[in-house]
Amino acid sequence: MTPVAPTPGVVIETSGLAKQYRGTLAVDGLDLQVPRGSVFGFLGPNGSGKTTTIRMLMGLIEPTAGSARVLGRPMPRSSRSVLPKVGALIEGPALYGFLSGQDNLIRYDAADPTADPRTRKARVGSALDRVGLTAAAGKKAKAYSLGMKQRLGLASALLQPRELLVLDEPTNGLDPQGMREIRALVRELADDGTTVFLSSHLLDEIEQVCTHAAVMARGRLITQGPVAELSAGTRGRLEVTTPDPVETVRVLAAHGVTDLVTDPHTAQVTGELPAEPPDLAELNAALVAAGVRVRGFGLRRASLEDAFVALTGEGFDVAG
Amino acid sequence: MSRAETTAGPGLHDGDPGHRPGEPVRERAPAPPASRTPRAAWSLGLFGSELLIVFRRARTLALLGVLAGVPVLVGIAVRIETRGGHSVGGDGGGGPAFLEQISNNGLFLAFASLAATLPFFLPMAIGVVAGDSVAGEASTGTLRYLLVAPAGRTRLLLAKYASVLTFCVAATLVVVLSAVVVGFSLFPVGDVTLLSGNTVSLSDGILRGLLIALLVASSLIGLAALGLFISTLTDSGIGAMAATVGLLITVQIINNIPQLHALQPYLFPHYWLSFADVMRAPVIWTGILKNLALQFLYAAVFGSAAWARFTTRDVTA
Ligand SMILES: Nc1ncnc2c1ncn2[C@@H]1O[C@H](COP(=O)(O)OP(=O)(O)OP(=O)(O)O)[C@@H](O)[C@H]1O
Ligand SMILES: [Mg+2]
């Protein structure tokens, strides 16, 4: 168990990290590398081991095997020096119901021995402000809605300037406006130089904010890298909207388009372009020349979901 | 002169009053957060915060309210009993021979109340607070956020134990103060007749009362450590409270079964009532010292066990 020297420019680095709960192997041989300054999406279906990994990174549970480094230092051994620079939201917020939102933050701030009590009030105030809870600061936390609790949990991660933020499903329970605000907040933090590691099972969410991503399934890492590269692995699908699907399929097949699927509900025909794709303008002209009435024509960009399905060959379901 | 200010500006990261942390910073490459060092004095903040958590809870206030009510009940009962002029019989339901003296001297209500609450009420309150200390935070999930703050497991456990001990003192003082207020307002107060028959001045009696309060509070430190240990074993606050109180009741029962006398000197409540020996002249210290030694032994054993468990356990709740 002697981990090698930390890789420069990497804030989270694990090698062979594994965790076995009684019976279940929740995380299995994880080699993760999170570059400094990235917004890193940690993807996976329910029960794939995301929270378990985060708990190990935060020193809450001991790995069964392997090692983890956070900010270049081994965890959980260096918790005391690493964690003050890390803000975390782990498996939802946890609050003292009988305390006000503000007093909850004061409580968590007081638990950090590196937090200056003289600036506590001001820092709590600005954290509340950042998540839009200033108006509800004096309300008892048990009277908070799910989304308000989630915001307060985020505020507790923002009590100090952080080098790394670890957010486990940060938009869980938020309304669409709240989700947008959190995404904006994440981008803003990333612009300030904070590395953000966020787990989610929402693929669009990751696509919208993340620069990098890793995909977990059944405790194993399937892939990791820049988001652009992950979805570049799969080519986009051609999409034609038309009331004449039969003729469309015939023409497209003649031009080498494969895996043609007709969806009668949306009146769309989709298909996989060949390795050396024909000029799309000519393809469109060929359809029109064959008498096909084309309402829509275009290439749908490959989504992470396509990448995910391509990688695993399976859907996004909970493993049994 | 303004030059000095500009150069000092970026360094004064936290203290700079001109910059509110919420404001977006418009510099391109912001400096990484200044590395902060822990200060010993700031660690006390955690203890202060623990005290707030314990004493702001409605449950704690209810427990203290019940404890404050005991002297009121005892005082009123004695007052009604002695209205006809005769004193309460010496069959001693309330412990070692304090009850019949209350009508002569209100100060004895404090001793009688401590003797009445020490077997169950007082330790039960401690069991609830100690049992809940870690397990309660685990069951609500707040424990994981304290640990990533990072409170530090040893530091958190010490702060928890210190706050439970503070509660022991507070609970004892609530009984004593309530008894003094009720005793002094319902009964005459004067020179104190000790159990050994001698009489001492009221101020001497009050000093002995304070010593007794201290001894009673110290009698609870073993149970406090035991409760803390049980609290580190489970993620259920209610479970830990129930287990601690259940254990207390079991031990008290064993302590009163004559056939098990070989075991009894090792039970934490065995010497609890030794505090009555302070009310003798000269004071008999043997029982008192045995009690203190036993309490410290329990504190050492279960405190270490709690530490060993808490610093190695997985926090999954
Ligand atoms: N405390 C525990 N004891 C036993 N097994 C556990 C425990 N916590 C998690 N597991 C198991 O470990 C596996 C991974 O769980 P984990 O919570 O890490 O998943 P996740 O990726 O965070 O899922 P979700 O998206 O639902 O939050 C699951 O099979 C789960 O049943
Ligand atoms: Mg999870």
Image (spheres, coloured by chain):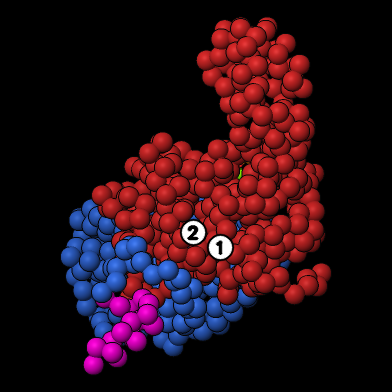
Chain colours: A red, B blue
Using residue A188 as the reference point, say whether residue B109 is left or right of it. Answer: left
Locate residue B258, reporting x and y percent: 65, 59
Quarter of the picture holding the N terminus of chain B? bottom left
Alpha carbon separation for disc pair 1 and 2: 7 Å
Q: Are marks 1 and 2 on the same chain?
A: yes
Amino acid bearing label 1: Gly
Name the residue at 75% across, 64% down. Answer: A67
Among the two numbered marks 1 and 2 on one chain, the one whose residue lies closer to the N terminus: 1
Amino acid bearing label 2: Ala
Q: Are marks 1 and 2 in contact (CB under 8 Å)?
A: yes
Locate residue A219, reporting x and y percent: 75, 45
- For disc 2, the neighbor class at 10 Å (few under 14, some 14 to 19, many from 20) is many
Parent chain of label 2: A
Using residue B97 as the reference point, say whether residue B239 is left or right of it. Answer: right
* Front in this rendered view, residue B118 or A248: A248
- Say which quarter of the image contains residue B311: bottom right
Question: What span is colored magenta in the figure?
Answer: B1-17
Marker disc for residue A190: 2
Name the residue at 28% across, 53% down. Answer: A134
* Front in this rendered view, residue B109 or B161: B161
Ligand 1, by image quadrant, is top right
